[in-house]
Amino acid sequence: MPELNTPSRTMYVDSHCHLNFPDLHQDLPGILASMTRNAVGHALVVSVNLQAWPQIVDLAETYPQLWASVGVHPDYEDVPEPTVDDLVERAAHPKVIAIGETGLDYYRLSEPLDWQRARFCRHIAAARQTKLPLIIHTRAAPQDTIRMLREEGAEQAGGVMHCFTESWEVAQAALDLGFYISFSGIVTFKNARQIHDVARKVPLDRLLIETDSPYLAPVPYRGKRNDPSLVVHVAEHIAQLRDVPVGAIAQASTDNFFRLFSKATAHPS
């Protein structure tokens, strides 16, 4: 494994959170303190629309342990559509390390969804142009998501399947494209057997952990507000599933974060 520009001590990294959302932003000092206590050294604050993007960048500029992405979530129907140039221009910011979150979501919305697929294509094009990895959201659309990643050449940028909830077959298809698999608090849920199976099988050098906070708090905080400091519980449960020390999951997922989001290594905390 190549030497990475990361802090020498083992730590955790939350690869996907929404610290700009009101219920987290209003308690930011307390959350940052909790992250420090739990050895959560970095967090990626993920964009869901361009209107809130300046606030995300402000967080990343203010706090060295935070990073930003740029993108528009597939669920956001009535918002200005980003162009490839919009995404590429914002991706030039030194603290922006990824494109997304983007993808397909057929769960809440129904056809025609050509606008959603066109938006996804533009994000992939921006990732290919900037060489920044994609953060992929997919819900109730695994076949179309994988098909579009293949057809649009997403392997040229790489990325992560965030908050993974699909089958091992879908995970294999993403891995074959060079993507990483990220697990959220859902992996701690007792009835999430399919996700448990994937968490056992994903190669250690392709595994990431996240909170997707303020949502999906892990056991034993299920149903409560989530925040990046709780990503340690995701790591602990994956370690139990794989029968390895939690430090192995912490170290691997941290190394993987800085390998995938390689732009982040230019600005260590």
Image: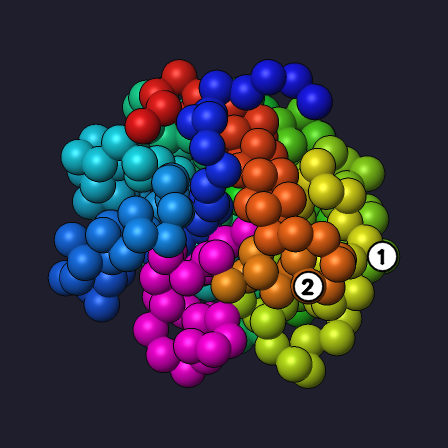
Residue 169: numbered disc: 1
Residue plotted at (36% across, 24% down): 268
Of 139 and 115, which appears nearest the observer? 139
Among numbered discs 2 and 1, the one appearing first in the sequence? 1
Instruction: Say which quarter of the image contains residue 30.
Output: bottom left
Residue behind mark 2 = 240
Q: Which residues are magenta?
A: 209-232
Asked if the residue under mark 1 is in contact with the one under mark 2, i.e. CB atoms within 8 Å, the reply is no
Instruction: Say which quarter of the image contains residue 140.
Output: bottom right
Q: Is residue 178 visible?
A: yes
Within the magenta stretch, is there residue 102?
Answer: no
Q: How many marks?
A: 2
What colour scheme has been applied to the protein in the rendered image? rainbow
Q: CA distance from mark 2 to mark 1?
A: 23 Å
Of 92 and 245, which appears nearest the observer? 245
Instruction: Say which quarter of the image contains residue 150.
Output: top right
